[in-house]
Image (tube, helix red, strand yellow):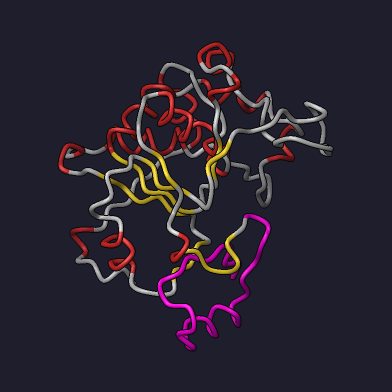
Amino acid sequence: ESGLPDGRIRLHRYGEPQLEADYPGLVELREKLPNGPLDIPGKGGLRSMAWMFHGEPLAHWLRSLEDSDAYTFAWVMEDDVGYSGSMAELVRAYAADPHDLVSGRWISTPAPREPPKGPRFTGGWYWYYDVTDAFDRKVPPENRCITEEHVQRMSFRLLREVERWCREGVSTVSELLVPTVACMSGMMVKPLREEHIGDPFHYESRVEEVDWQRIRASGESPGRLYHALKF
């Protein structure tokens, strides 16, 4: 339960064909997946690029808003994130923070993947080469940065710039796209505060339902983010 009045809850619906029509860079990115379709998880053949490419869905949502000028920031959370407290408290904790991107535990420069293709790799960042040609031309390797994206707060200024890049075909996986857009545009970026990070909070970790019930009931770590809740 969100605790919000029904009129304050807005659902944005879209399909992958819509995204590919509006942002054809997604088609190029699909063709460049290091391990082909197997890189995108899904059941029964339902494999959505939105799993690793958040930029285009966010851009599609942004364009649907009739009142986007009424907002300064937006929180973006993956659906398997848990928070051991009131979401209102988390939002208030960053309300006065002017950073355009608050994201993950770190923001860093990716290393080239070795080898560039295939299901296994011995070094570097797995998605390093899954970029559109337009992105490769626009962003020198030394200006690229990556971050965890389980939980992010973005300014609408940043969202509009992400939408512009995606519309122009300058795209890549969103772990790379969003922080790179911010840094290339002279915006302010920072990680989430350590006090808000729970244990675990990692893309390979798992929080079972019994563990989540214990965390919530005990109150041992209030006001912390956890990933990933798989139940």
Lateral position of residue 86 relative to residue 140, left or right: left
Residue closest to the eye, 208 or 124: 124
- Determine whether 223 is above or below 130 in the image: below
Residue 58 lies in the magenta-colored region: no
Please state which of residues 222 and 74 is positioned toward the viewer in this rendering. 222
Residue name at image x 60 percent, y 33 percent: 109
Q: Position of residue 88 (x, y in %)?
A: 28, 66
Magenta highlight on residue 204: yes
The residue drawn where x is 78% and y is 26% is 116
**In the image: residue 135, left or right of residue 71:** right
Residue stretch in magenta = 203-231
| Quadrant assignment for the N terminus | bottom left
Nearer the observer, 108 or 165: 108
Residue 26 vertical placement versus 13 (above, below): above
Give how far across and how far down residue 84 sits, in percent. Answer: 44, 74
Label total for image: 0
Please identify the residue farthest to the top as the structure is shown.
137
Displayed quadrant of residue 132? top right
Location of the C terminus (image quadrant):
bottom right
x and y percent of residue 221 in the render?
A: 48, 78
Above or below, comparing residue 110 to residue 71 in the picture: above
Residue closest to the far bottom = 218
Residue drawn 42% across the image and 45% down it: 190
Residue at x 21% of width, y 64% of height? 6
